[in-house]
Image (tube, grey):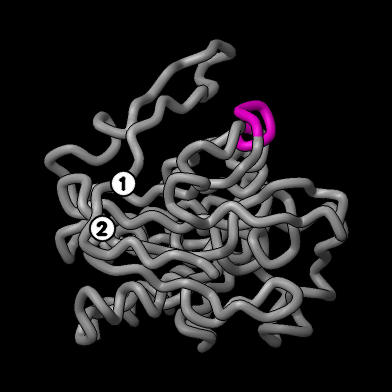
Amino acid sequence: MLTNKEGQNVPKVTFRTRANNDWVNITSDELFSGKTVVVFSLPGAFTPTCSSTHLPRYNELAKTFQANGVDDIICLSVNDGFVMEAWQKDQHADNVRIIPDGNGEFTEGMGMLVDKNDLGFGKRSWRYSMLVKDGVVEKMFIEPEKPGDPFEVSDADTMLNYINCNAEKPEFVTLFTKEGCGHCTRAKQLLQEHGMDYEEVTLGNGITTRSLRAVSGNATTPQVFIGGKLIGNADDLAAYFRQ
């Protein structure tokens, strides 16, 4: 039976992390004391759900969490520091603090250490999220105890809705560009001036003008999509912001 730790202090442990090619020890007190922190814990770096959905969405909503009183977002997994550092770089998850619980001490203290021997993983964390205020767990969202790897309640949107159900979420912005395109540079500057994060897709490496024409109806760059809607080129984007 997994343990709900609402109203209790988080475990006091020292995490062995990697930074700038060196070992850096970080304590629970450093992570949680005097702060409001969102934690989400998952079975393993580089695994499908963790990489495709769990981590990316928290990274996308980081600014929204911050605007609603959250000081830090921590992703925790029973993996070593090398693996977690490599995963963060691979995911470009710069808005989330990646913490390796290599020995599973924190996870065990939270009552979330489970046996994943059937997958060859050994001891790992059950998937959950929690809101921690000054080291005390205010709220936990624990995935239901069922076979496999359920992902129903520990997602970023559920946590944000708990913190503020009326929080304004950012729209997805995708920008198709090519190297040496001055209009692309202008479009990126416009997005940055309006505080909009974006995903840049650069033509090449399998992305061709044919691909661009298929999704936008145009073969020229840039082509900007906001919230799934085609805005168009840099001039169209400027007109969009004027409106």
| Residue type indicated by callout 1 | Val
* Position of residue 191 measured from the top left corner of the image (x, y, whole percent): 37, 62
What x and y, as percent, mark residue 157?
40, 77
Residue at x 87%, y 60% (from the top left corner): 118
Placement of 186 over or under 223, stated as above or below: above
Q: Quadrant of residue 174?
A: bottom right
The crowd level at tag 2 (other Cα within 10 Å; few <14, some 14-19, many 20+) is many
Q: Which residues are magenta?
A: 80-85
**Left or right of 45 in this view: 61:** left
Residue 173 visible, this angle: yes
Rendered location of residue 211, percent (x, y): 81, 74
Position of residue 227 relative to residue 97, above or below, is: below
Query: Which residue: 23% across, 85% down?
Result: 165
Q: Is residue 134 magenta?
A: no
* SS for dot 1: loop
- Which residue in the structure is indicated by mark 2? 137
Residue 1 or residue 203, whichever sits in front? 1
Q: Is residue 83 magenta?
A: yes
Under circle 2, the secondary element is strand
Residue 194 shows up from this direction? no
Left or right position of 32 against 156: left
For mark 1, what is the residue? 10
**Image quadrant in which the C terminus is located:** bottom left
**100, 56: nearer the viewer:** 100
User: Mark 2 belongs to which amino acid?
Assistant: Val
Name the foreground residue: 180 vs 112: 112
Q: Residue at x 48, y 79 (%)?
A: 153
